Image (spheres, rainbow, N blue to C red):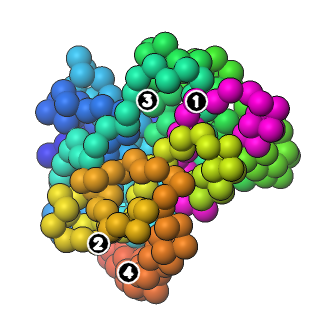
């Protein structure tokens, strides 16, 4: 069992868990992920590692309540345990001295850019971070991203904080102003990563994206997380999660993300009904 040591609620639906997992923390590197189960009869879900402390033996994950499992997980608190916590999985992000690196994070995906930005800075790169969210209330880890960057640009879709607009706007400005950029790293919603890649592609700047498609076993056996990269089928769990954003078949990826939308709704409805019945029994 993997005990929750700390919990922080960044918003009403975005939560941070620090989990006691020394074996995972010992080998964790930026860009890798874990697969966890809340309960023995629950589904397995992948979460990118947001931070790790090898000395303390802890792994930090950030998640948003979007379906049955994440809502079930949000009911846990300090002292509770997860049934399974497997990792670190996937290939770590390539970190070396590239020069100037622009890290782009969207939504709660900002949290998973933190260890990458920190590692890039420690490797001697100039790190410029662009982070964005729909509105100010959904922005997370601004101070942490500022500490991991030489420059931080904050965007909100509605203009409630920072620059109004999408994260691609300041990136495009830098590229058009002949600002030398040696690498772009983008993590967030698939649609955001797609347009970051489309923005940098005409300028020939290498762009790395972290893909989190449907996933089951995390070992390359089930094939559920397959993605098409440069016309070749890859498995995000073992060949990624990082890929060349200019070579990803984004339309296929976005279509595959919608395959089980109805089943996910049904699962959530069944769980809510069960929770409601349990609450009624407890009050009786």
Residue 215 spot, x, y in % from top left: 30, 65
What is the span of residues highlighted in magenta in the rendered image?
171-192
Above or below, 282 against 47 in this view is: below
> Which residue does the numbered mark 3 point to in the structure image?
115
Is residue 188 found inside the magenta-colored segment of the image?
yes
Q: CA distance from mark 2 to mark 1?
A: 33 Å
> Which residue does the numbered mark 4 point to in the structure image?
267
Mark 1 touches mark 4? (CB < 8 Å): no
> Which residue does the numbered mark 1 point to in the structure image?
182
Q: Can residue 156 be seen here? A: no
Question: Mark 2 or mark 4: which comes first in sequence?
Answer: 2
Badge 4 crowding class, 10 Å Cα cut-off, few under 14, some 14 to 19, many 20 or more, is some
> Which residue does the numbered mark 2 point to in the structure image?
224
Q: CA distance from mark 3 to mark 1?
A: 19 Å
Question: Mark 3 or mark 2: which comes first in sequence?
Answer: 3
Q: Secondary structure at mark 3?
A: helix
Q: CA distance from mark 2 to mark 4?
A: 19 Å
């Amino acid at each position: 069992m993997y005990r929750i040591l700390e919990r922080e609620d960044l918003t009403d639906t975005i939560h941070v868990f620090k989990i006691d997992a020394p074996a995972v923390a010992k080998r964790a590197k930026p860009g890798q992920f874990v697969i966890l189960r809340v309960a023995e009869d629950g589904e397995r879900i992948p979460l990118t590692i947001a931070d790790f402390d090898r000395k303390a033996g802890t792994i930090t994950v950030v998640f948003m309540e979007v379906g049955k499992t994440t809502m079930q997980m949000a009911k846990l608190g300090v002292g509770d345990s997860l049934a399974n916590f497997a990792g670190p999985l996937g290939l770590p992000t390539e970190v070396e001295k590239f020069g100037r690196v622009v890290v782009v994070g969207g939504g709660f995906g900002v949290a998973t850019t933190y260890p990458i930005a920190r590692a890039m800075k420690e490797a001697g790169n100039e790190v410029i971070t662009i982070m964005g969210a729909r509105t100010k209330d959904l922005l997370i880890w601004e101070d942490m991203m500022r500490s991991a960057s030489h420059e931080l640009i904050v965007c909100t879709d509605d203009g409630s904080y920072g620059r109004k607009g999408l994260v691609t706007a300041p990136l495009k400005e830098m590229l058009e102003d002949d600002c030398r950029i040696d690498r772009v790293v983008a993590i967030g919603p698939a649609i955001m990563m797609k347009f970051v890649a489309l923005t940098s592609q005409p300028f020939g700047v290498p762009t790395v994206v972290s893909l989190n498609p449907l996933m089951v076993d995390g070992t390359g056996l089930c094939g559920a997380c397959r993605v098409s990269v440069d016309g070749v089928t890859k498995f995000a769990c073992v060949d990624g999660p990082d890929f060349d954003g200019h070579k990803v078949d984004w339309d296929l990826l976005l279509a595959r993300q919608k395959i089980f939308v109805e089943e996910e709704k049904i699962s959530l409805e069944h769980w809510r009904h069960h929770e409601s019945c349990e609450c009624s029994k407890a009050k009786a």
